[in-house]
Amino acid sequence: MPIRVGLTGGIGSGKSMVARIFENLGIPVYYADAAAKRLQQTDPALKTLIVRHFGEDAYVDDELNRQYIAKLVFADPHKLDLLNSLVHPATLKDAEQWLNAQSTHYAIKEAALIFESGSHRDLDFVIGVFAPESLRISRVMQRDHVSAEEVVRRMKRQVSDRIKSRLCDFVIHNDETQLVIPQVLKVHETLLNTTLPGRS
């Protein structure tokens, strides 16, 4: 079983870009957000729960009605928390199966809410990707075509960088003043040279 490494970072930090660098180094990456979307389409038990809590309109022709769900959860934070509480256990189980199937020295689970969800407890190490808030806001505004206020609202749902940086085992700065690839290579070498009892 490989060493289990989490990769996290606030919205706009660039964690997906960092994940792709690790993939280019031959390290498999589990993308929790993409998996959650897939499971809402394919996991029968999860689909049943979503219909039970959000109504028959949650699916149209067996496809998740994303527009309907988005309208509900963005209007009501409690409904967003409810949806996350349904999807999270299914994603955790899926990630566990995926991690156990990997044969590399270490494997990465990329997720925005590793600490918020408590999934860091099932990981051996966590890498955090960090960038100044102003830079993160401008990145997300350009990427998602949303206002600064909307970006800040999303940020408030995540643990602050100040707290998160203390919880991470490795820190990568994606602030446009430091090269990212050398930082990733350093973490990669450290992990390759790390052995844990009972791991490959």
Image (cartoon, helix red, strand yellow):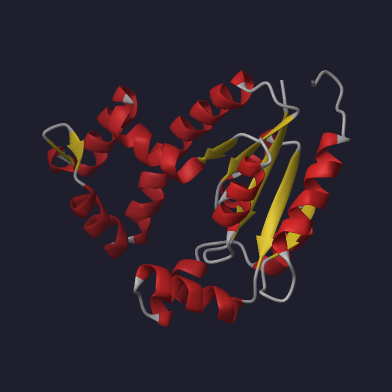
The location of residue 27, given as percent across then percent down, is: 66, 36
| Of the pair 198 and 138, the residue shown nearer to us | 138
Q: Is residue 92 left or right of residue 167?
A: left
| Of the pair 30 and 50, the residue shown nearer to us | 30
For the question of whether residue 118 can be seen, the reply is yes
For the question of whether residue 169 can be seen, the reply is no
Relative height, residue 16 to residue 35 (above, below): below
| Of the pair 36 and 69, the residue shown nearer to us | 36
Q: How many marks?
A: 0
Q: Which of the image's four quarters has the C terminus?
A: top right
Relative height, residue 182 to residue 100 (above, below): below
The location of residue 129, given as percent across then percent down, is: 67, 60
Can you name the residue that lies furthest to the front here?
24
The location of residue 185, given as percent across then percent down, is: 78, 50
* Residue 109 location, quadrant: top right
The residue sitting at 76% across, 42% down in the picture is 125
Q: Which of the image's four quarters has the N terminus?
A: top right
The residue sitting at 71% across, 62% down in the picture is 180
Q: Is residue 24 left or right of residue 1?
A: left
Relative height, residue 147 to residue 123 (above, below): below
* Residue 98 location, quadrant: top right
* Residue 190 location, quadrant: top right
The location of residue 101, given as percent across then percent down, is: 60, 19
